Amino acid sequence: QDMLKKGRNGKTGVSGERHPHTKLKENDIIDIIKSNFSYRKLACVYDVSISTIARIKKRQVWAHVKVED
């Protein structure tokens, strides 16, 4: 309860580019989704984990970003 009262539950209420810890921008997300490179290659290029790339590709995160075909 003390943690919640002091706002230390880790929830900032901010998502996407505005989140203070994000490494990626919406343009990066669009490029990742459209890319045919391997997850490993994309992870190296964008300096994120392979699981982050997988979650982006599966639209589990950054789902609010619209990608035109």
Image: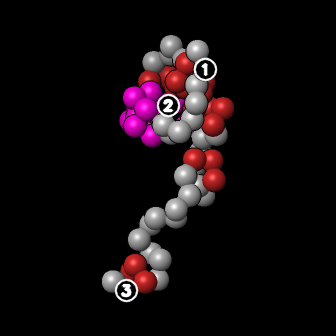
Foreground residue among 17 and 67:
67
**Nearer-N-terminus badge (3/1):** 3
Dots 1, 2 in contact, CB < 8 A: no
Residue extending farthest left: 1
* Quadrant of res 32: top right
Mark 2 or 3: in front is 3
Q: Is residue 44 in sight in this rendering?
A: yes
CA neighbours of label 1 inside 10 A, class few (<14), some (14 to 19), many (20+): few
The structure residue drawn at horizontal position 50% and vertical position 13%, both measured from the top left corner, is 36
Q: Which quarter of the image is occupied by the N terminus?
A: bottom left
Q: Tell whether position 51 is magenta.
A: yes
Amino acid found under the numbered disc labelled 1 = Glu
Q: Which quarter of the image is occupied by the C terminus?
A: top right
Secondary structure under badge 2? helix
Amino acid found under the numbered disc labelled 3 = Asp
CA neighbours of label 2 inside 10 A, class few (<14), some (14 to 19), many (20+): some
The image's mark for residue 56 is none
Residue under numbered circle 2: 43
The structure residue drawn at horizontal position 39% and vertical position 29%, both measured from the top left corner, is 58
Give how far across and how far down residue 31 sits, in percent: 60, 24
The structure residue drawn at horizontal position 45% and vertical position 18%, both measured from the top left corner, is 38
Residue under numbered circle 3: 2
Give how far across and how far down residue 33 sits, in percent: 52, 24
Residue under numbered circle 1: 68
**Magenta-tinted stretch:** 43-61
